[in-house]
Amino acid sequence: MNKIGNDAKNLLGQPLDLPCGVRLKNRLVKSAMSDSLGDGAGNPTEVQVRLYERWAEGGAALSLIGEVQTNPHYPEKPGNLVLAPDADLTALKALARRGSANGSNIWPQLGHAGALAHGPISDPKGPSPLDVEGLRCDGMSLEDIHGLPQTYAQAASLAHKAGFGGVQIHAGHGFLFSQFLSPLFNHRTDAYGGTVQRRFRVIGEVIDAVRQAVGPAFPIGIKINSTDKLEGGLTTDEALQIVQLLDETSVDLIDISGGTYFPGAASSSEGTSSSDPYFIDFAMQAKQITSIPIMLTGGFETRDQATKVLSDGSADAISLARAMVLNASLANTWLSDAGGDPEFPTFDAPPRGGVTAWYSMRLTALGEDREEQFVLSPADALEAYDTRDAQRCETWRNRFS
């Protein structure tokens, strides 16, 4: 093996010790994605269980289940899981057990879509009322806000009971806690709006409640935006203040990302391909002001990119989404002598949302062990994705109305 391959293998294969005492076996993580593979009633399916089992078999140190809802009334999509008291615990235990094969960890990403809740199955509600093109929502009452810590604590307790290795709190990408942090969404004049410290307050309360519920040895991660990438949204300077506030909490892993699903906003990932990882400069700055491990999400396509970020000290772990959709065993590949990078597809004039839908539908193919037969175009994938969502909306309404 040449020196470059050996250095990469050593860096990527180094275990990561979290403050709570849990050890991740290497530095490669499957990022949270909205896989949309729940049954429409908030429970896991066999296809979803198999998908996470494949990433565990493929060598990932940790897989994050994206958009697991703490409240069924504000979901991101009707394919989300819901960690509610009457959830299917048997199915959740199967997902936790098979997703933690091969020494891997699997954590649900605890979320609440807030103003971006899926309209056909919710009445969206965010920190403040909004009525702009493509987005309308009511504002949360103080009673609504005060109920959030207990809701998240209850969901985290259920995750613990089901056998998951930890949880991640979603405070990025324009969903509820990202909305609280962003002055574009949060116009409150009470204790939960105004300064960065006040906009962060509910998140700090949720972290404290979750920690009290799960104990000191259970990992709690959080995903935050480095920027909203919107005029008037969260700035980089404000995001660094949030990192400083997180440093005073019991969080075990800070996941750095950016962007928002605000209607009409440019997604960090939507496009035909990328060239470099996102948000490296911010992660490097964050590393200087916190002792909590930093994970970087977005835009990683090659082993060299991942190795460079670790060797530069810009981050402690690398979180991969689309790369691990193209190769479910990418962690094992990058930890092998030879390495090898996934071949990213390019698309000619895909419809808006088509590329994201293509990767989402490929997740289904992975869970069915038939990715070799996956031949959808972005337009066809978008149609299939929307059709499936529409069908699941009816199931969701029957289950949670």
Image: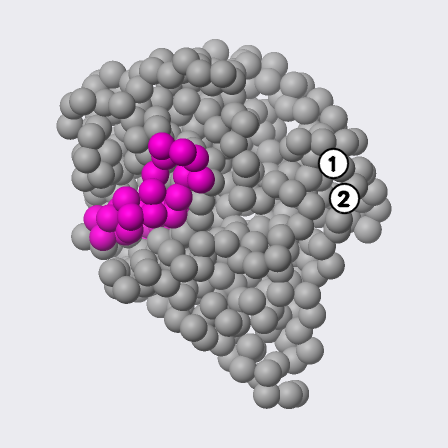
- Other residues around mark 2 within 10 Å, as few (<14) / some (14–19) / many (≥20): some
The disc placed on residue 350 is: 1
Q: Which residue is mark 2?
A: 347
Residue drawn at x 55%, y 19% is 396
Amino acid carrying label 1: it is: Pro
Which percent across, then down, holds residue 123? 44, 13
Left or right: 207 with respect to 38? left
- Can the viewer see residue 156? no
Q: Determine the image quadrant of residue 156.
A: top left
Amino acid carrying label 2: it is: Phe
Q: Is residue 75 above or below residue 249?
A: above
Depth order, front residue of 78/104: 78
The verdict on residue 232 being magenta is: yes
Question: What residue range appears in magenta?
Answer: 218-245
Residues at discs 1 and 2 in contact (Cβ within 8 Å): yes
Residue drawn at x 40%, y 25% is 114
Which percent across, then down, holds residue 306? 53, 67
Residue drawn at x 35%, y 22% is 126
Residue drawn at x 70%, y 61% is 342
